[in-house]
Image (cartoon, grey):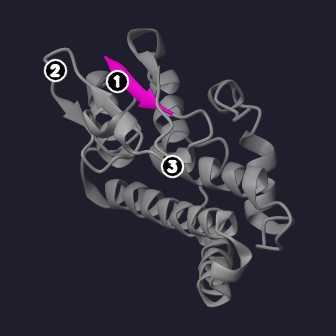
Amino acid sequence: MKLYFSPTSPYVRKVRVVAIEKGLADRIELVPATPWPDPAVVASANPLGKVPALTLEDGSTLYDSPVICEYLDQLVPAQPLIPREGPQRWGVLRRQALADGILDAAVAIVLERRRPEAQRSPEAMTRAEQAIRRSVAALGGELRPLEAPFDLGQIALAVALGYLEFRLSDLELGTRSGPAHAFWQAVKSRPSLAATRPP
């Protein structure tokens, strides 16, 4: 399998963490592809021009991170990161959706900051910051006990918190104390997260 990746993409990091947790990292070739500002570098694998994209042995490609993570999880059925059914499944998928929403808002701020100052939208950045703060505040009711099995919801939340620390540490987004801070401090040294830390 080939994974088109950028080392600073949090969506790619989520996939790489899943691959490590499932013991699949040595079966995946990493193909560098930085689609910003030129999405053409990955368009042959993903017409959306985004990473991650995973090319399978049969030549077909999967995208984006939720689909790839579920595929990798099912390759090794033992100790699933996504429960197969029931309330536990929907809880994991809800946590992943919350984390991906945090990432979407954070990436929007990062991209807005890259625009010339005169072209930036303060309203868009404020809206994204508010979405992140609300979501971080909601984490208190979403975080499972640390001794519980590490599932995809926890992985996604850890990656989101790591990205906020990496890209937006200058903003007060509610991650410097409370449940989100405690969770991140407890999991950031986990081998799969340490191995995928952005440069």
Res 150 seen here: no
Instruction: Write down the quadrant of residue 125 in the picture.
Output: bottom right
Q: Determine which residue is flagged by label 3.
A: 37
Q: Farthest top residue?
A: 26
Is 4 a magenta residue?
yes
Secondary structure under the numbered disc 2 in the rendered image: loop
- Dot label at residue 78: 1
Q: Secondary structure at mark 3?
A: loop
Question: Residue at coordinates 61% horizontally, 47% vertically from top-left?
Answer: 159
Q: Earlier in the sequence, mark 3 or mark 2?
A: 3
Q: Quadrant of residue 134?
A: bottom right
Where residue 35 sits in the image (x, y, percent)?
Answer: 46, 42
* Amino acid of disc 3: Pro
Find the magenta span and give its range.
1-5
Residue 3, x across and y down, in percent: 39, 25
Seen in the picture, residue 197 relative to 66 is either above or below; the reply is above
Say whether residue 3 is magenta: yes
Quarter of the figure with the N terminus: top left
Q: Which residue is mark 2?
A: 59
Name the residue: 51% across, 64% down: 104
- Relative vertical location of residue 177 with respect to residue 120 in this rendering, above or below: above
* Amino acid type of the residue tagged 2 in the rendering: Gly
45 or 67, nearer to the observer: 45
